[in-house]
């Protein structure tokens, strides 16, 4: 009994090859109509990711501040110029590299998202690959954000136990740049988590359970 | 023509409710047999995650080191005791919290993984929820690893630009504990990425494309 029904259903699918929508109705286990395509949301989120990564990168790179300090010698009116740059700390170089990688990654995936937006149903393999790479990017960018945030916090508050003095009282503009860049990186990390969410949701909607 | 086929297929599915395997064959778009169940790999990975999180936590908490320093005053043979503890730095407190959350999370998901291991095909919603929470945990744990790593690096190398002195030449055991804990946290983050991968792969194998 069951095998006859299966044959009938297979015939139904084969006869309606020109109308893909009918094929999805062939089994009650599969949802009605083509699987949902969330690549418009994906595309907009990736645009937002690119914008935030670029802005964080620009704010980080332009964080240089030069300040004059009196030499402190009595009777000598000379100044010493000391500057604060982001590349004086390996943590900020790591953040720079992570943001640059995020920029490149978002440009590549924006192009792929553009190409897939018009298709009725992109392959599950593509969604799987996107989840994989997005999760890797979450790991890279959030660890870079944590790294930069830790150094920025020591710069802001200092640490009396280790005698690490705070530097933000002298280099206010520098610290504002670093802090803003870290905050925008955190925002970009959250966007990446949402992107994983969108791809996984899209994949779960295509599942036959 | 198409609507008649749909009716036939629906009857086929209804009549074969007692044999779920026949239902999967009802459409040529769905793969043959029940969807794969990767909860054994999932279970083992989550056990490894729990083990690594617990060991990183223990190594972090036991990182206290007390050291005697000479007062430096000439003719005075007195010592000053100074200790290094993980809770002197907010970065390590964040790592502690993140590792504790990972321990709790892995215990909860080990139980759910145990329950789902024996079922032939867990629901797509569960896999989606696992991807979501695992990705969030990747973000939390990798940022905590980055934070602790940044402070550990400054402790190891110092920073001449900001006059932050290194402390690992005095507190060797403390630094080894912190470094080991950070390394094991990094390993736990990688396991979480692999867990996302397994769930997403499982979900993509259940897709009808």
Image (cartoon, coloured by chain):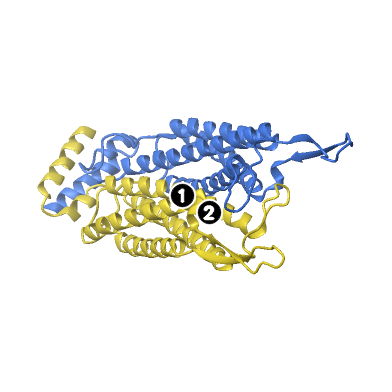
Chain colours: A blue, B yellow
Asked whether A120 or A38 is in front, the reply is: A38
Q: Residue at x 44, y 41 (%)?
A: A193
Q: Position of residue B15 (x, y in %)?
A: 10, 47
Q: Is residue B161 visible?
A: yes
Going by the image, does B122 lie left or right of A36? Answer: left
* A16 over A147 or under it: above or below: above
Residue A74 vs A5, above or below: the answer is: above
Tell me the quarter of the picture where residue B155 sits: bottom right
Q: Nearer the viewer, residue B59 or B13?
A: B59
Marks 2 and 1, the one that precedes in the sequence: 1
* Residue B1 seen anywhere in this rendered image of the structure: no
Where residue A174 appears, as percent x and y from the top left, is 68, 35
Left or right: A128 in relation to A78? left
Position of residue A141 relative to residue B54, above or below, is above
Q: Chain of mark 2?
A: B
Where disc 2 sits, the SS reads helix
Q: Which mark is residue B148?
A: 2
* Residue under label 1: B94
């Amino acid at each position: 009994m069951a095998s006859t029904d299966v044959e009938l259903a297979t015939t139904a699918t084969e006869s309606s090859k020109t109308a893909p929508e009918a094929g999805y109705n062939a089994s009650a286990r599969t949802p009605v109509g083509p699987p949902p395509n969330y690549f418009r949301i994906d595309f907009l989120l990736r645009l937002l990711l690119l914008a935030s990564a670029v802005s964080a990168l620009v704010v980080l790179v332009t964080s240089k501040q030069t300040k004059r300090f009196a030499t402190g010698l009595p009777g000598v009116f000379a100044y010493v110029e000391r500057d604060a740059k982001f590349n004086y700390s390996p943590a900020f170089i790591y953040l720079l590299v992570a943001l640059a990688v995020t920029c490149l990654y978002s440009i590549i995936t924006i192009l792929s998202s553009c190409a897939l937006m018009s298709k009725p149903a992109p392959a599950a393999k593509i969604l799987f690959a996107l989840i994989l790479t997005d999760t890797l990017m979450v790991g890279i960018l959030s660890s870079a954000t944590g790294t930069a945030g830790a150094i920025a916090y020591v710069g802001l508050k200092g640490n009396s136990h280790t005698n690490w003095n705070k530097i933000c009282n002298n280099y206010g503009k520098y610290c504002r740049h670093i802090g803003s860049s870290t905050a925008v990186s955190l925002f970009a990390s959250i966007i990446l988590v949402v992107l994983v969410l969108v791809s996984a949701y899209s994949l779960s909607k295509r599942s036959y359970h």
